[in-house]
Protein backbone atom coordinates (compact mmCIF):
# COMPACT_ATOMS: atom_id res chain seq x y z
CA UNK A 1 0.00 0.00 0.00
CA UNK A 2 1.38 3.46 -0.86
CA UNK A 3 1.74 5.95 1.97
CA UNK A 4 -0.35 9.11 1.63
CA UNK A 5 1.52 12.40 1.74
CA UNK A 6 0.24 13.64 5.12
CA UNK A 7 2.80 14.21 7.89
CA UNK A 8 2.22 14.07 11.62
CA UNK A 9 4.65 14.57 14.49
CA UNK A 10 4.16 12.98 17.85
CA UNK A 11 6.25 12.34 21.00
CA UNK A 12 5.54 8.66 21.25
CA UNK A 13 4.32 6.24 18.61
CA UNK A 14 3.16 2.85 19.82
CA UNK A 15 2.76 0.04 17.31
CA UNK A 16 0.12 -2.47 18.44
CA UNK A 17 -3.15 -1.65 20.20
CA UNK A 18 -3.17 -4.83 22.29
CA UNK A 19 -2.86 -5.17 26.05
CA UNK A 20 0.67 -3.75 26.38
CA UNK A 21 0.32 -1.02 23.74
CA UNK A 22 -2.97 0.42 25.02
CA UNK A 23 -1.98 0.25 28.66
CA UNK A 24 1.36 1.93 27.96
CA UNK A 25 -0.40 4.62 25.90
CA UNK A 26 -2.71 5.46 28.81
CA UNK A 27 0.16 5.75 31.29
CA UNK A 28 2.45 7.73 28.94
CA UNK A 29 -0.35 10.09 27.89
CA UNK A 30 -1.25 10.83 31.50
CA UNK A 31 2.41 11.53 32.25
CA UNK A 32 2.22 14.28 29.63
CA UNK A 33 3.48 12.63 26.43
CA UNK A 34 1.62 13.06 23.16
CA UNK A 35 0.88 9.48 22.19
CA UNK A 36 -0.46 7.75 19.12
CA UNK A 37 -1.20 4.02 18.86
CA UNK A 38 -1.43 2.25 15.49
CA UNK A 39 -2.76 -1.22 14.79
CA UNK A 40 -3.39 -3.07 11.56
CA UNK A 41 -6.46 -4.75 13.02
CA UNK A 42 -9.89 -3.15 12.78
CA UNK A 43 -10.58 -3.62 16.50
CA UNK A 44 -8.27 -3.01 19.46
CA UNK A 45 -7.12 -5.66 21.94
CA UNK A 46 -8.76 -8.65 20.32
CA UNK A 47 -6.81 -11.06 22.53
CA UNK A 48 -8.08 -9.32 25.65
CA UNK A 49 -11.61 -9.82 24.31
CA UNK A 50 -11.25 -13.60 23.88
CA UNK A 51 -9.04 -14.14 26.92
CA UNK A 52 -10.06 -16.11 29.98
CA UNK A 53 -13.01 -17.65 28.16
CA UNK A 54 -14.43 -14.15 27.59
CA UNK A 55 -13.87 -12.92 31.18
CA UNK A 56 -10.21 -11.92 30.90
CA UNK A 57 -7.94 -13.46 33.51
CA UNK A 58 -6.26 -10.06 33.82
CA UNK A 59 -3.64 -10.83 36.48
CA UNK A 60 -2.46 -13.31 39.06
CA UNK A 61 -2.02 -12.30 42.68
CA UNK A 62 0.86 -14.80 43.00
CA UNK A 63 2.91 -13.00 40.34
CA UNK A 64 6.61 -13.70 40.95
CA UNK A 65 9.55 -13.64 38.54
CA UNK A 66 9.96 -17.43 38.73
CA UNK A 67 6.58 -17.82 37.03
CA UNK A 68 8.00 -16.42 33.80
CA UNK A 69 10.24 -18.09 31.22
CA UNK A 70 13.11 -16.16 29.68
CA UNK A 71 16.70 -16.81 28.70
CA UNK A 72 17.46 -14.27 31.44
CA UNK A 73 15.24 -15.17 34.42
CA UNK A 74 16.23 -11.91 36.19
CA UNK A 75 15.09 -9.59 33.39
CA UNK A 76 11.40 -9.34 34.38
CA UNK A 77 12.11 -8.66 38.10
CA UNK A 78 12.36 -4.90 37.96
CA UNK A 79 9.24 -4.22 35.89
CA UNK A 80 7.15 -6.78 37.81
CA UNK A 81 8.21 -5.25 41.13
CA UNK A 82 7.33 -1.71 40.06
CA UNK A 83 3.86 -2.44 38.64
CA UNK A 84 2.12 -5.13 40.65
CA UNK A 85 -1.18 -6.98 40.26
CA UNK A 86 -2.54 -4.77 43.07
CA UNK A 87 -1.82 -1.63 41.06
CA UNK A 88 -3.87 -2.99 38.17
CA UNK A 89 -6.65 -4.02 40.58
CA UNK A 90 -6.67 -0.43 41.92
CA UNK A 91 -7.03 0.85 38.37
CA UNK A 92 -10.01 -1.44 37.74
CA UNK A 93 -11.57 -0.28 41.02
CA UNK A 94 -11.38 3.36 39.95
CA UNK A 95 -13.37 2.32 36.86
CA UNK A 96 -15.96 0.50 39.00
CA UNK A 97 -14.98 -3.00 37.86
CA UNK A 98 -15.14 -6.03 40.13
CA UNK A 99 -13.54 -9.46 39.82
CA UNK A 100 -13.30 -12.89 41.37
CA UNK A 101 -10.48 -15.34 42.04
CA UNK A 102 -11.12 -18.59 40.21
CA UNK A 103 -8.20 -20.75 41.30
CA UNK A 104 -4.47 -20.43 42.05
CA UNK A 105 -4.59 -16.63 42.33
CA UNK A 106 -6.15 -16.13 38.88
CA UNK A 107 -8.33 -13.01 38.82
CA UNK A 108 -11.17 -12.84 36.31
CA UNK A 109 -13.44 -9.95 35.48
CA UNK A 110 -17.03 -10.25 36.80
CA UNK A 111 -18.14 -8.61 33.56
CA UNK A 112 -17.15 -9.66 30.07
CA UNK A 113 -13.56 -8.95 28.92
CA UNK A 114 -14.84 -6.04 26.89
CA UNK A 115 -14.98 -4.12 30.20
CA UNK A 116 -11.17 -4.31 30.43
CA UNK A 117 -10.86 -3.02 26.86
CA UNK A 118 -13.13 -0.11 27.79
CA UNK A 119 -10.86 0.69 30.77
CA UNK A 120 -7.75 0.62 28.55
CA UNK A 121 -9.36 2.91 25.97
CA UNK A 122 -10.66 5.32 28.63
CA UNK A 123 -7.17 5.55 30.08
CA UNK A 124 -5.75 6.36 26.63
CA UNK A 125 -8.46 9.01 26.24
CA UNK A 126 -7.64 10.46 29.68
CA UNK A 127 -4.08 11.01 28.43
CA UNK A 128 -5.38 12.51 25.20
CA UNK A 129 -3.84 9.69 23.20
CA UNK A 130 -5.03 8.74 19.74
CA UNK A 131 -5.73 5.19 18.54
CA UNK A 132 -5.72 4.57 14.79
CA UNK A 133 -6.93 1.16 13.63
CA UNK A 134 -6.70 -0.60 10.26
CA UNK A 135 -3.31 1.00 9.57
CA UNK A 136 -0.50 -0.75 7.71
CA UNK A 137 3.04 0.08 8.80
CA UNK A 138 5.18 0.20 5.67
CA UNK A 139 8.62 1.28 6.81
CA UNK A 140 10.48 2.39 9.93
CA UNK A 141 13.51 4.64 9.53
CA UNK A 142 15.78 5.92 12.33
CA UNK A 143 16.43 9.66 12.06
CA UNK A 144 18.52 12.13 14.04
CA UNK A 145 15.41 13.26 15.99
CA UNK A 146 13.88 9.84 16.48
CA UNK A 147 11.93 7.76 13.95
CA UNK A 148 10.11 8.25 10.68
CA UNK A 149 7.37 5.71 10.18
CA UNK A 150 5.71 5.35 6.79
CA UNK A 151 2.16 4.06 7.10
CA UNK A 152 -1.02 3.71 5.08
CA UNK A 153 -2.27 6.93 6.74
CA UNK A 154 0.86 8.90 6.00
CA UNK A 155 4.27 9.64 7.48
CA UNK A 156 4.54 9.84 11.25
CA UNK A 157 7.56 11.32 12.98
CA UNK A 158 8.09 10.27 16.58
CA UNK A 159 10.77 10.78 19.20
CA UNK A 160 10.04 7.39 20.74
CA UNK A 161 8.90 4.24 19.03
CA UNK A 162 7.36 1.51 21.18
CA UNK A 163 6.81 -1.87 19.64
CA UNK A 164 3.88 -3.72 21.21
CA UNK A 165 2.87 -5.95 18.32
CA UNK A 166 2.95 -9.18 20.36
CA UNK A 167 4.10 -12.61 19.29
CA UNK A 168 3.10 -15.17 16.67
CA UNK A 169 0.28 -16.97 18.44
CA UNK A 170 -3.04 -17.11 16.60
CA UNK A 171 -2.33 -15.49 13.20
CA UNK A 172 -6.10 -15.46 12.54
CA UNK A 173 -6.38 -12.83 15.28
CA UNK A 174 -3.82 -10.54 13.66
CA UNK A 175 -0.55 -11.89 15.11
CA UNK A 176 2.51 -11.14 12.98
CA UNK A 177 6.27 -11.34 13.29
CA UNK A 178 6.52 -7.54 12.92
CA UNK A 179 8.45 -7.04 16.18
CA UNK A 180 11.05 -9.63 15.15
CA UNK A 181 11.44 -8.14 11.67
CA UNK A 182 11.97 -4.71 13.17
CA UNK A 183 14.45 -6.10 15.68
CA UNK A 184 16.41 -7.70 12.80
CA UNK A 185 16.35 -4.39 10.93
CA UNK A 186 18.15 -2.83 13.90
CA UNK A 187 20.47 -5.81 14.34
CA UNK A 188 18.93 -6.89 17.66
CA UNK A 189 19.02 -10.60 18.39
CA UNK A 190 15.96 -12.77 18.87
CA UNK A 191 15.42 -15.91 20.91
CA UNK A 192 13.75 -18.23 18.37
CA UNK A 193 10.00 -18.03 18.96
CA UNK A 194 8.00 -21.19 19.61
CA UNK A 195 4.40 -21.90 20.55
CA UNK A 196 3.68 -21.96 24.30
CA UNK A 197 0.61 -22.75 26.43
CA UNK A 198 -0.48 -25.06 23.64
CA UNK A 199 -2.05 -28.56 23.51
CA UNK A 200 0.14 -31.55 22.61
CA UNK A 201 -0.50 -33.72 19.58
CA UNK A 202 0.34 -37.42 19.26
CA UNK A 203 0.58 -39.86 16.38
CA UNK A 204 -0.20 -43.57 16.00
CA UNK A 205 -1.41 -45.68 18.91
CA UNK A 206 -1.37 -43.01 21.64
CA UNK A 207 -3.36 -40.67 19.37
CA UNK A 208 -6.00 -43.37 18.82
CA UNK A 209 -6.14 -44.23 22.51
CA UNK A 210 -6.40 -40.59 23.61
CA UNK A 211 -9.11 -39.96 21.02
CA UNK A 212 -11.17 -42.74 22.67
CA UNK A 213 -10.90 -40.74 25.91
CA UNK A 214 -11.60 -37.31 24.36
CA UNK A 215 -13.38 -35.13 26.92
CA UNK A 216 -12.05 -37.05 29.96
CA UNK A 217 -10.25 -34.84 32.47
CA UNK A 218 -8.36 -35.69 35.65
CA UNK A 219 -5.91 -34.03 38.08
CA UNK A 220 -2.34 -35.12 37.41
CA UNK A 221 1.27 -34.09 37.90
CA UNK A 222 3.41 -33.58 34.82
CA UNK A 223 7.17 -33.15 34.40
CA UNK A 224 9.33 -32.01 31.47
CA UNK A 225 12.98 -31.53 32.33
CA UNK A 226 13.09 -29.62 35.63
CA UNK A 227 9.59 -28.14 35.22
CA UNK A 228 6.63 -29.63 37.06
CA UNK A 229 2.93 -28.76 37.37
CA UNK A 230 0.04 -30.31 39.28
CA UNK A 231 -3.15 -29.39 37.46
CA UNK A 232 -5.87 -30.97 35.32
CA UNK A 233 -5.17 -32.91 32.12
CA UNK A 234 -7.73 -33.24 29.34
CA UNK A 235 -7.71 -35.95 26.65
CA UNK A 236 -8.53 -34.63 23.17
CA UNK A 237 -9.04 -36.10 19.69
CA UNK A 238 -5.52 -35.00 18.80
CA UNK A 239 -3.69 -35.62 22.07
CA UNK A 240 -3.52 -33.96 25.48
CA UNK A 241 -4.60 -30.56 26.73
CA UNK A 242 -5.92 -28.97 29.94
CA UNK A 243 -4.00 -26.56 32.20
CA UNK A 244 -1.31 -29.10 33.17
CA UNK A 245 -0.39 -29.80 29.54
CA UNK A 246 -0.61 -26.14 28.49
CA UNK A 247 1.73 -25.16 31.32
CA UNK A 248 4.31 -27.86 30.61
CA UNK A 249 4.19 -27.21 26.84
CA UNK A 250 6.00 -23.89 27.38
CA UNK A 251 8.96 -25.81 28.85
CA UNK A 252 8.84 -28.79 26.48
CA UNK A 253 11.49 -29.24 23.78
CA UNK A 254 10.63 -31.08 20.58
CA UNK A 255 11.39 -34.81 20.73
CA UNK A 256 11.47 -34.83 24.56
CA UNK A 257 9.26 -37.13 26.65
CA UNK A 258 6.93 -35.80 29.32
CA UNK A 259 6.17 -37.77 32.45
CA UNK A 260 2.63 -37.95 33.78
CA UNK A 261 1.87 -38.82 37.39
CA UNK A 262 -1.77 -39.92 37.63
CA UNK A 263 -1.60 -39.56 41.43
CA UNK A 264 -0.71 -35.85 41.16
CA UNK A 265 2.09 -36.19 43.71
CA UNK A 266 0.20 -38.46 46.15
CA UNK A 267 1.85 -41.73 47.23
CA UNK A 268 0.17 -44.21 44.82
CA UNK A 269 1.38 -47.42 46.46
CA UNK A 270 0.18 -46.24 49.90
CA UNK A 271 -3.23 -45.39 48.42
CA UNK A 272 -3.56 -48.84 46.84
CA UNK A 273 -2.53 -50.58 50.08
CA UNK A 274 -5.12 -48.61 52.05
CA UNK A 275 -7.76 -49.49 49.48
CA UNK A 276 -6.77 -53.16 49.71
CA UNK A 277 -7.39 -53.01 53.48
CA UNK A 278 -10.83 -51.46 52.94
CA UNK A 279 -12.03 -53.36 49.85
CA UNK A 280 -10.23 -56.72 49.97
CA UNK A 281 -13.12 -58.55 48.33
CA UNK A 282 -13.58 -56.11 45.43
CA UNK A 283 -11.83 -56.17 42.07
CA UNK A 284 -8.94 -53.79 41.49
CA UNK A 285 -10.79 -52.27 38.49
CA UNK A 286 -13.98 -51.53 40.45
CA UNK A 287 -12.03 -49.72 43.19
CA UNK A 288 -9.72 -47.95 40.75
CA UNK A 289 -12.79 -46.41 39.08
CA UNK A 290 -13.73 -44.68 42.34
CA UNK A 291 -10.54 -42.60 42.06
CA UNK A 292 -9.93 -42.32 38.33
CA UNK A 293 -12.29 -41.66 35.38
CA UNK A 294 -13.95 -44.91 34.31
CA UNK A 295 -13.02 -44.52 30.63
CA UNK A 296 -9.37 -44.10 31.60
CA UNK A 297 -9.62 -47.13 33.90
CA UNK A 298 -11.10 -49.16 31.01
CA UNK A 299 -8.25 -48.21 28.68
CA UNK A 300 -5.58 -48.99 31.29
CA UNK A 301 -7.31 -52.35 31.84
CA UNK A 302 -7.36 -53.11 28.08
CA UNK A 303 -3.67 -52.28 27.85
CA UNK A 304 -2.93 -54.63 30.76
CA UNK A 305 -1.47 -51.80 32.87
CA UNK A 306 -3.98 -52.46 35.62
CA UNK A 307 -5.30 -55.97 36.40
CA UNK A 308 -8.96 -54.92 36.37
CA UNK A 309 -10.36 -58.34 37.35
CA UNK A 310 -7.84 -59.16 40.10
CA UNK A 311 -9.20 -59.28 43.67
CA UNK A 312 -7.57 -56.48 45.64
CA UNK A 313 -7.19 -58.64 48.77
CA UNK A 314 -5.14 -61.16 46.79
CA UNK A 315 -2.67 -58.63 45.40
CA UNK A 316 0.83 -58.44 46.88
CA UNK A 317 2.59 -55.28 48.03
CA UNK A 318 5.03 -55.74 45.15
CA UNK A 319 2.21 -55.88 42.57
CA UNK A 320 0.56 -52.74 43.96
CA UNK A 321 3.90 -50.91 44.09
CA UNK A 322 4.69 -51.85 40.47
CA UNK A 323 1.32 -50.60 39.20
CA UNK A 324 1.62 -47.39 41.23
CA UNK A 325 5.12 -46.85 39.83
CA UNK A 326 3.91 -47.23 36.23
CA UNK A 327 0.98 -44.88 36.76
CA UNK A 328 3.12 -42.22 38.41
CA UNK A 329 5.90 -42.41 35.78
CA UNK A 330 3.84 -42.57 32.58
CA UNK A 331 6.29 -41.60 29.84
CA UNK A 332 4.76 -40.00 26.77
CA UNK A 333 6.48 -38.45 23.77
CA UNK A 334 4.28 -35.92 21.98
CA UNK A 335 4.76 -35.75 18.22
CA UNK A 336 4.33 -31.98 18.44
CA UNK A 337 1.91 -29.28 19.50
CA UNK A 338 -1.12 -27.68 17.89
CA UNK A 339 1.25 -24.80 17.03
CA UNK A 340 0.47 -21.15 16.43
CA UNK A 341 -3.16 -21.89 15.54
CA UNK A 342 -4.12 -22.40 19.20
CA UNK A 343 -1.07 -21.37 21.25
CA UNK A 344 -1.94 -18.81 23.93
CA UNK A 345 1.54 -17.33 23.90
CA UNK A 346 4.87 -17.16 22.16
CA UNK A 347 7.90 -18.38 24.08
CA UNK A 348 11.04 -16.51 22.99
CA UNK A 349 11.13 -13.16 21.22
CA UNK A 350 13.36 -10.09 21.45
CA UNK A 351 16.47 -11.13 23.36
CA UNK A 352 16.35 -9.44 26.76
CA UNK A 353 20.12 -8.86 26.56
CA UNK A 354 19.29 -6.23 23.96
CA UNK A 355 16.97 -4.30 26.30
CA UNK A 356 17.22 -2.40 29.55
CA UNK A 357 15.25 -4.25 32.21
CA UNK A 358 14.33 -0.90 33.83
CA UNK A 359 12.98 0.77 30.69
CA UNK A 360 12.54 -1.83 27.90
CA UNK A 361 14.61 0.47 25.67
CA UNK A 362 16.94 -1.15 23.13
CA UNK A 363 20.50 -0.58 24.35
CA UNK A 364 21.80 -0.12 20.78
CA UNK A 365 18.92 2.05 19.53
CA UNK A 366 17.98 4.94 21.83
CA UNK A 367 14.29 5.74 21.62
CA UNK A 368 13.24 2.24 20.49
CA UNK A 369 11.34 0.12 23.04
CA UNK A 370 9.81 -3.36 23.00
CA UNK A 371 7.05 -4.31 25.45
CA UNK A 372 4.61 -7.17 26.10
CA UNK A 373 4.72 -10.54 24.43
CA UNK A 374 7.18 -9.43 21.74
CA UNK A 375 9.91 -9.66 24.39
CA UNK A 376 11.46 -12.97 25.49
CA UNK A 377 9.43 -13.05 28.71
CA UNK A 378 6.61 -15.58 28.85
CA UNK A 379 4.30 -16.10 31.78
CA UNK A 380 2.62 -19.23 33.07
CA UNK A 381 -1.02 -19.81 32.34
CA UNK A 382 -3.28 -17.87 34.71
CA UNK A 383 -3.06 -14.10 34.19
CA UNK A 384 0.73 -13.81 34.22
CA UNK A 385 1.02 -12.78 30.58
CA UNK A 386 -1.31 -9.82 31.00
CA UNK A 387 0.56 -8.81 34.14
CA UNK A 388 3.75 -8.76 32.05
CA UNK A 389 1.97 -6.66 29.39
CA UNK A 390 0.89 -4.11 32.06
CA UNK A 391 4.24 -4.11 33.91
CA UNK A 392 6.48 -3.81 30.83
CA UNK A 393 4.19 -1.10 29.41
CA UNK A 394 4.32 0.82 32.69
CA UNK A 395 8.12 0.58 32.85
CA UNK A 396 8.52 1.90 29.30
CA UNK A 397 5.98 4.71 29.79
CA UNK A 398 7.84 5.95 32.87
CA UNK A 399 11.16 5.86 31.02
CA UNK A 400 10.15 8.14 28.14
CA UNK A 401 12.14 11.34 28.10
CA UNK A 402 10.64 14.79 27.63
CA UNK A 403 12.69 16.63 25.01
P1 LIG B 1 -1.28 -8.53 21.78
O1 LIG B 1 -1.18 -9.74 20.95
O2 LIG B 1 -2.34 -8.42 22.81
O3 LIG B 1 -1.36 -7.23 20.89
C1 LIG B 1 -0.58 -7.04 19.75
C2 LIG B 1 -1.30 -6.07 18.83
O4 LIG B 1 -0.44 -5.77 17.75
C3 LIG B 1 -2.56 -6.65 18.23
O5 LIG B 1 -3.63 -5.76 18.39
C4 LIG B 1 -2.20 -6.87 16.75
O6 LIG B 1 -3.30 -6.66 15.88
C5 LIG B 1 -1.15 -5.80 16.55
N1 LIG B 1 -0.22 -6.10 15.46
C6 LIG B 1 0.41 -7.26 15.20
N2 LIG B 1 1.15 -7.14 14.11
C7 LIG B 1 1.01 -5.86 13.66
C8 LIG B 1 1.53 -5.15 12.56
N3 LIG B 1 2.36 -5.74 11.69
N4 LIG B 1 1.16 -3.85 12.39
C9 LIG B 1 0.30 -3.27 13.27
N5 LIG B 1 -0.24 -3.90 14.32
C10 LIG B 1 0.13 -5.20 14.52
N6 LIG B 1 -3.07 -14.00 29.10
C11 LIG B 1 -3.44 -13.80 30.37
O7 LIG B 1 -2.67 -13.25 31.15
N7 LIG B 1 -4.70 -14.17 30.78
C12 LIG B 1 -5.60 -14.77 29.95
O8 LIG B 1 -6.75 -15.03 30.32
C13 LIG B 1 -5.18 -15.03 28.61
N8 LIG B 1 -6.00 -15.69 27.75
C14 LIG B 1 -5.61 -15.89 26.45
C15 LIG B 1 -6.47 -16.56 25.58
C16 LIG B 1 -6.09 -16.76 24.26
C17 LIG B 1 -6.98 -17.53 23.34
C18 LIG B 1 -4.85 -16.23 23.80
C19 LIG B 1 -4.44 -16.36 22.37
C20 LIG B 1 -4.00 -15.56 24.67
C21 LIG B 1 -4.37 -15.40 26.01
N9 LIG B 1 -3.52 -14.76 26.91
C22 LIG B 1 -3.92 -14.60 28.22
C23 LIG B 1 -2.21 -14.21 26.49
C24 LIG B 1 -2.37 -12.71 26.27
O9 LIG B 1 -3.49 -12.48 25.45
C25 LIG B 1 -1.13 -12.11 25.63
O10 LIG B 1 0.02 -12.50 26.32
C26 LIG B 1 -1.23 -10.58 25.60
O11 LIG B 1 -2.35 -10.21 24.84
C27 LIG B 1 0.03 -9.97 25.02
O12 LIG B 1 -0.16 -8.58 24.95
P2 LIG B 1 0.60 -7.73 23.84
O13 LIG B 1 0.00 -6.39 23.90
O14 LIG B 1 2.04 -7.89 23.96
O15 LIG B 1 0.18 -8.42 22.45
Image (tube, rainbow, N blue to C red):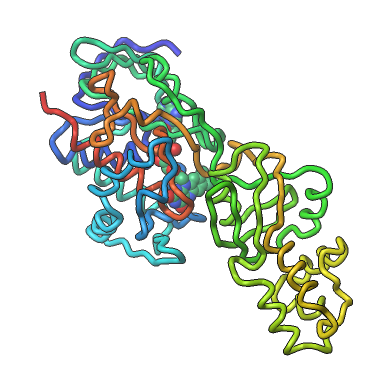
Q: Position of residue 177 (x, y in %)?
A: 48, 26
- Residue 125 lies, with reference to residue 180, above or below; the image says below
Q: Residue at x 69, y 58 (%)?
A: 329
Q: Residue at x 26, y 49 (%)?
A: 81
Image coordinates of residue 85 in percent, x first then y, are 30, 55
Q: Residue at x 57, y 46 (%)?
A: 225
Of residues 281 and 166, which is closer to you in this image?
Answer: 281
Q: Is residue 44 visible?
A: no
Q: Nearer the viewer, residue 363 or 260?
A: 260
Q: Quadrant of ligand 1?
A: top left
Asked whether the viewer can see residue 396, the reply is yes
Indicate left or right for 117 with 341 as reference: left
In which image quadrant can residue 28 be found? top left
Q: How many marks?
A: 0
Quarter location, residue 69: top left
**Quarter of the figure that contains the N terminus:** top left
The structure residue drawn at horizontal position 24% and vertical position 39%, both measured from the top left corner, is 395
Amino acid sequence: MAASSSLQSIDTLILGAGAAGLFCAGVAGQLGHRVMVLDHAKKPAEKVRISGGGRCNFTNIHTRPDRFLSQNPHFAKSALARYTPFAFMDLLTTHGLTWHEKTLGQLFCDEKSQAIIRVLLKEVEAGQGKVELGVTVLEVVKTAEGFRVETSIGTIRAKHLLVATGGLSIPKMGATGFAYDLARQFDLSIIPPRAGLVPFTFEGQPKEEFAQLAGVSCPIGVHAGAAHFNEAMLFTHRGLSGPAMLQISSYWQEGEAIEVDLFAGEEGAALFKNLRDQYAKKSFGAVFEKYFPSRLAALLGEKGIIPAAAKLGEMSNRQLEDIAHQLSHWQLTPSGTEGWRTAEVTVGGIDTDELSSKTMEAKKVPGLYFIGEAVDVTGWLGGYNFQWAWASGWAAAHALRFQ
